[in-house]
Image (cartoon, rainbow, N blue to C red):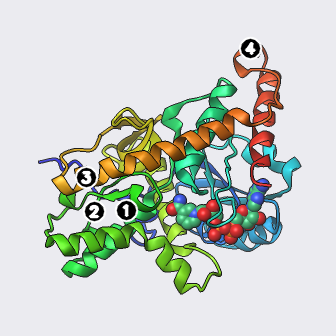
Amino acid sequence: MFSRIVRPAASGLIRGLSTSAQNNARVAVLGASGGIGQPLSLLLKNSPLISNLSLYDIAHTPGVAADLSHIETRAKVTGYIGAEQLPESLKGADVVVIPAGVPRKPEACAKTCPEAMICVIANPVNSTIPITSEMFKKHGVYNPNHIFGVTTLDIVRANTFVAELKGLDPARVNVPVVGGHAGKTIIPLISQCTPKVEFPQDQLETLTVRIQEAGTEVVKAKAGAGSATLSMAYAGARFVFSLLDAMNGKEGVIECSFVRSEETECTYFSTPLLLGKNGIEKNLGLGKLSAFEEKLVGEAMGELKGSIKKGEDFAKNFKKTASINLLKCDTLEERSAVKRSVLFKMAAWYE
Ligand SMILES: NC(=O)c1ccc[n+]([C@@H]2O[C@H](COP(=O)([O-])OP(=O)(O)OC[C@H]3O[C@@H](n4cnc5c(N)ncnc54)[C@H](O)[C@@H]3O)[C@@H](O)[C@H]2O)c1
């Protein structure tokens, strides 16, 4: 029987970067010099799926790009630095990954090129995705199937912790994680784990809290010097490779992600998604929940709605700088001008 959740065998990552699959994806990383950005860019550089890797940051990108460019893989690496180089860094991007930002600060952020798939790592994801969506809407370029909040680290952690407890190979474990991407809005669906696993209720509760608070575990272990960067880079790369595989025509690629949703009363929600050539092909929904998981979903709603509203309000109050709407553009030049202004505007959120 087809399992609803299959562990994605993403070309270029699972497990050991040893695939011969190839395509010509152009990927841009915004915030490429940071704790996540650098190892993420390294993993992307190692992929045969990527022909062009564009690295943008407000600092250090020439060095990061020069360093990575010596690696004997096909992706051509180019570094861009400073706001004036941002539009160039996004030219022709198929996928934009955004780890720019300040760890653990509720800074709104996102920058984009309208046709690309946008993968937002920057926190708080529960608000940055509504912000990103509102900005795209304002400029008439919104496609909900293209905007993803990257929650993959929650799934990666859940797989690892379950495997540890049950003595399983983590590469064979798959726990869907739904809801949002902060504290109790992170809801691991252990009842849907493959292979099937069972825990006594007290252990299940401890495990759930560990998955929800795993970010804090890393922050504490790093003694306040940062948050998860290496595991996040892995998780971000896994998500991008799954997306590229699906865009490349591979069938049955499923990842959980925080997206525009009609699966619950929350307007944004993470559930397993079937990915395809145009981003989200089908939202696979919550599936059958245990009573415990239903309770967790119910308890998360208030916080999640609050964070979504915060993001939407932020976007609403954001001072409008772009005057033309993309839909009103007649020429390619006009479209490009609008795109550039949206990107600059979004870049300003990081400052
Ligand atoms: N989604 C997740 O699961 C997850 C996990 C861990 C961290 N995060 C988030 O990822 C973000 C990055 O974390 P980090 O540890 O890499 O932080 P970092 O401070 O090490 O790196 C951030 C990078 O962004 C750059 N930057 C800042 N403003 C910019 C701008 N306007 N344009 C371009 N680049 C800009 C900085 O120069 C820096 O290189 C944070 O928001 C963090 O909370 C998300």
Q: Element at badge 4?
A: helix
Tell me the CA gap for discs 1 and 3. 20 Å
Q: Say what amino acid the circle numbered 4 marks.
A: Lys
Residue receiving disc 3: 295
Closer to the chain start, of discs 1 and 3, is 1
Q: Quadrant of residue 73?
A: bottom right
**Residue 99 placed where, x, y %?**
63, 59
Closer to the chain start, of discs 4 and 1, is 1
Tell me the CA gap for discs 3 and 4. 47 Å
Dot label at residue 176 = none
Name the mark nearer the viewer: 3 or 4. Answer: 3
**Around disc 2, counting alpha carbons within 10 Å, would you say few (fewer than 14), some (14 to 19), or many (20 or more)?**
many
**Around disc 3, counting alpha carbons within 10 Å, would you say few (fewer than 14), some (14 to 19), or many (20 or more)?**
few
Residue receiving disc 2: 174
Q: Say what amino acid the circle numbered 3 marks.
A: Lys
Q: Is residue 46 above or below residue 314?
A: below
Residue receiving disc 4: 328
Residue at 59% from the left image edge and 36% from the top image edge: 133
| Quarter of the render that holds ligand 1 | bottom right
Residue at 83% from the left image edge and 32% from the top image edge: 321
Tell me the CA gap for discs 4 and 2. 45 Å
Q: Element at badge 3?
A: helix
Task: Confirm or deny contact between disc 2 and disc 3 (CB under 8 A).
Answer: no
Dot 4 beta carbon under 8 Å from ligand 1:
no
Q: Is residue 156 above or below residue 180?
A: below
Q: Say what amino acid the circle numbered 2 marks.
A: Asn
Residue receiving disc 1: 155
